[in-house]
Image (cartoon, grey):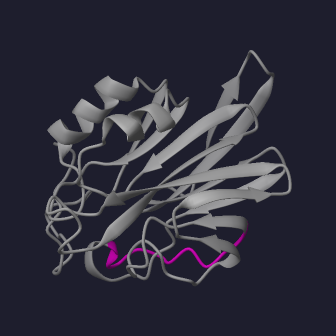
Amino acid sequence: FSLFPILFANPSFAESIEITSFGHSSLLIKGGGKKVLLNPFKAVGCAEGLREPKIDADLILASSKLSDEGAKLAKGTFFVEPGSYQVGNFRLEGLSIPHDRLGGRRYGMSTIWIWEQNGFKFAHIGGSAAPLSVEDKLIIGRPDIMIIGVGGGAKVYNGPEAADIIKDLKPKIIIPVQYIRNLNSPPKECDQTDLQ
């Protein structure tokens, strides 16, 4: 994981975004006067051994209520349910999608998050293994920055599934998340692999 931020600049708007990874599928996105934390986790399952993101953020967007992607341990306004939200001038769109390849029968539903921050359109598709519907693709559109799980297992896209979504949505920047970086010592209770 990287606690060193990555800076993206949009020359059209002369604006920038700073993204810091906490590992698993948790990122902190700073820009436009807001700090958005994605998928805060407890260090269990595939997140075992990682430092939990116990930080302050303005908004917290979780894919689900599972402890490895929706733990309420950071400070900020917490969102996990799908829907349309307006927080000041900040608009969020949450789409419901099955968390697994079984229509949600094993792990329930997950939330895809779409928002704009400091001139960048984001789509966070971490926390699912289900294909996107035509309607989902139309609502998501073409993101500037897309965050997508790629480690496989029962509730995360594998590499080929993620590649199909990337081909459909054509994001400008892709941030792969939710994969095991060190297969020599993987977490005990984890069915994910490395980048495939």
56 up-or-down from 33: above or below: below
Where does the magenta region start and end?
47-57
Number of marks in picture: 0
Depth order, front residue of 1/58 = 58
- Residue 125, horizontal then vertical, whole percent: 40, 49
Question: Any magenta on residue 69?
Answer: no
The residue shown at (42%, 71%) is 64
- Residue 160, horizontal then vertical, whole percent: 16, 37
Question: Any magenta on residue 52?
Answer: yes
Q: Quadrant of residue 152?
A: bottom left
The residue shown at (57%, 60%) is 83
Q: Residue furthest top?
A: 12
Residue 126 vs residue 133: left or right?
A: right
- Residue 51, horizontal then vertical, whole percent: 47, 76
Residue 164 vs residue 93: left or right?
A: left
Residue 127 shows in the view: no
The residue shown at (23%, 54%) is 129
The residue shown at (40%, 23%) is 170
The C terminus lies in quadrant: top left
Depth order, front residue of 42/81 = 81
Q: Residue furthest front?
A: 135
